[in-house]
Image: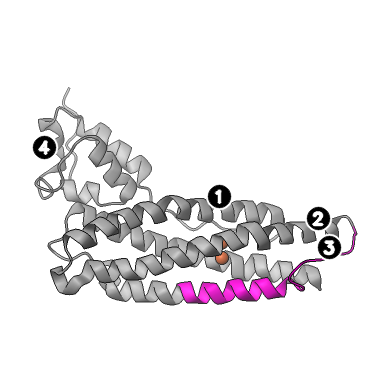
């Protein structure tokens, strides 16, 4: 029996996110030359079941909805949540976004007022800042908050720390958060609010969609750290 017809172009399906693009690439679907054609037709011509391929894309390209945090969560669990949801996400997406942007900027250095090289430039700065920032959190701030929480739970005095009050590293992290927020704003301006230009191929659209997703993720990440983790860690100190 014929499976139901899947609506949309190859571009529509491939550009939903990076993860969608990777599925399309894996099946050898050519989004460069066939991007504006019907996804359904192109799949059938390749002997693929469009319903199965689109279901696979659906399963990987779900939008990342914000996760509500229980106000009473232990700081240890909150740190685990931040690591699993936000840090792991960045470690996966930053390098592969960078690789795509490098290639795109090199291929189209002058197109559209050097849009891609300018975009790449801001992205490189965000990536460099974040990679260092994640290290500081994972190696210094998070373990120290964990030790403070354990000490308080056991009724022990707070352990001595090399940086004095926990408010010191917190202040530094929040300063870095502000810097990242500024860079995200610049990136959004360069990318014209992530509305892909008419000429953009699926690869380009996927990058734009993923940058927009990354921006939303970072806003959520920073909010959780500033408003919950940092505030409660400072309260432990009294
Ligand atoms: Fe973080
Ligand atoms: Fe942070």
Tell me the mark number nearer the camera, choosing from 2 and 4: 2
Tell me the mark number nearer the camera, choosing from 1 and 4: 1
Crowd class of label 4 (few under 14; some 14 to 19; many from 20; radius 10 Å): some
Crowd class of label 3 (few under 14; some 14 to 19; many from 20; radius 10 Å): few
Residue at 78 percent across and 66 percent down: it is 161
Q: In this rendering, would 210 be left or right of 114?
A: right
Residue, disc 2: 150
Residue, disc 3: 159
Give the distance between the C-alpha atoms of the residues marked 3 and 1, in whole angstroms: 26 Å
Return the disc, 3 or 1, that comes first in the chain's sequence: 1
Give the distance between the C-alpha atoms of the residues marked 4 and 3, in whole angstroms: 65 Å
Depth order, front residue of 42/88: 88
Give the distance between the C-alpha atoms of the residues marked 1 and 4, in whole angstroms: 39 Å
Tell me the mark number nearer the camera, choosing from 4 and 3: 3
Residue 138 in picture, x, y percent from top left: 62, 57
Return the disc, 2 or 4, that comes first in the chain's sequence: 4
Give the distance between the C-alpha atoms of the residues marked 2 and 3, in whole angstroms: 10 Å
Crowd class of label 2 (few under 14; some 14 to 19; many from 20; radius 10 Å): some
Residue 101 in picture, x, y percent from top left: 28, 59
Specify the quadrant of the image occupied by residue 213: bottom left
Return the disc, 1 or 2, that comes first in the chain's sequence: 1
């Amino acid at each position: 029996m014929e499976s139901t017809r899947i609506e949309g172009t190859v571009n529509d399906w491939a550009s939903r996110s990076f993860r969608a693009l990777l599925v399309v690439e894996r099946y050898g679907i050519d989004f460069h030359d066939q991007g504006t054609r019907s996804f359904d037709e192109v799949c059938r011509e390749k002997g693929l079941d469009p319903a199965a391929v689109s279901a696979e894309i659906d399963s990987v390209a779900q939008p990342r909805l914000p996760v509500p945090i229980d106000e009473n969560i232990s700081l240890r669990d909150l740190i685990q949540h931040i690591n699993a949801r936000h840090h792991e996400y960045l470690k996966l997406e930053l390098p592969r976004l960078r690789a795509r942007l490098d290639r795109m900027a090199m291929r189209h250095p002058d197109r559209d007022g050097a849009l891609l090289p300018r975009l790449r430039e801001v992205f490189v700065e965000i990536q460099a800042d974040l990679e260092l920032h994640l290290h500081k959190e994972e190696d210094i701030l998070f373990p120290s908050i964990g030790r403070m929480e354990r000490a308080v739970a056991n009724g022990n005095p707070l352990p001595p720390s090399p940086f004095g009050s926990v408010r010191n590293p917190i202040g530094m992290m929040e300063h870095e958060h502000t810097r990242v927020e500024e860079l995200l704003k610049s990136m959004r301006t360069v990318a014209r609010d992530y509305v892909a230009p008419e000429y953009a191929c699926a690869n380009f659209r996927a990058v734009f969609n993923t940058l927009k997703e990354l921006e939303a993720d970072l806003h959520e990440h920073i909010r959780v750290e500033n408003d919950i983790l940092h505030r409660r860690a400072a309260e432990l100190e009294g």
